[in-house]
Image (cartoon, grey):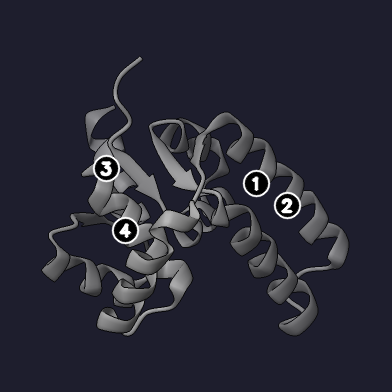
Amino acid sequence: MTEQRLLFDANAIYRLIRECPEKAMDKLMEGTTISLAYYELGNALWREAHLLKRISIEEAEKSLSLMYAMLVRMQVVEVYCEQGSEILQTAHKCNLTFYDSAYLVEAKKTSKILVTDDNKLAKAAEPLGVETLSSNTLIASQEHKG
């Protein structure tokens, strides 16, 4: 098995699964995510169903099952309390949420490429020396190879 060099944030996972489910599993298996992704994905689906009314709660449940099934097959890294201070400092310094900063800290600590579709997060990653990639770029690069 090759070393997993990609770290997916929940935003990229959500987008890959919703927009190109046939390619999502292969791409996601190339990387890791952090344990917060379970909650962030659930929240995104709750938002789509409850607040925005774009999908039914039944569709949200179906999507959640699919997303969780994919997460189970990925390497999911736990965020430990020892990292809390560094995550909080990064959040403060970069004006990001604690959640987004957790992805940055993990990517920096492990020298992984952060796959995110969040422009604010990608911009904050640059001065920290964290390389980023959008899910669109990831899929496009795969299509050129195949």
Quick one: label 1 or label 3, which is nearer the N terminus?
Answer: 1
Say whether residue 103 is visible.
Answer: yes
Q: SS of the residue at dot 3?
A: helix
**Badge 1 vs badge 3, beta-carbon distance below 8 Å:** no
> Which residue is under mark 2?
64
Residue for point 60% across, 63% down: 40
Judge whether 24 appears above or below 88 on screen. above
> Which residue is under mark 1?
67
**Badge 2 vs badge 1, beta-carbon distance below 8 Å:** yes
Say whether residue 9 is visible.
Answer: no
Q: Name the residue nearer the viewer: 127 or 23.
A: 127
Q: Amino acid at mark 3?
A: Thr
Q: SS of the residue at dot 1?
A: helix
Q: CA distance from mark 4 to mark 1?
A: 23 Å
> Which residue is under mark 3?
110
Judge whether 99 appears above or below 38 on screen. below
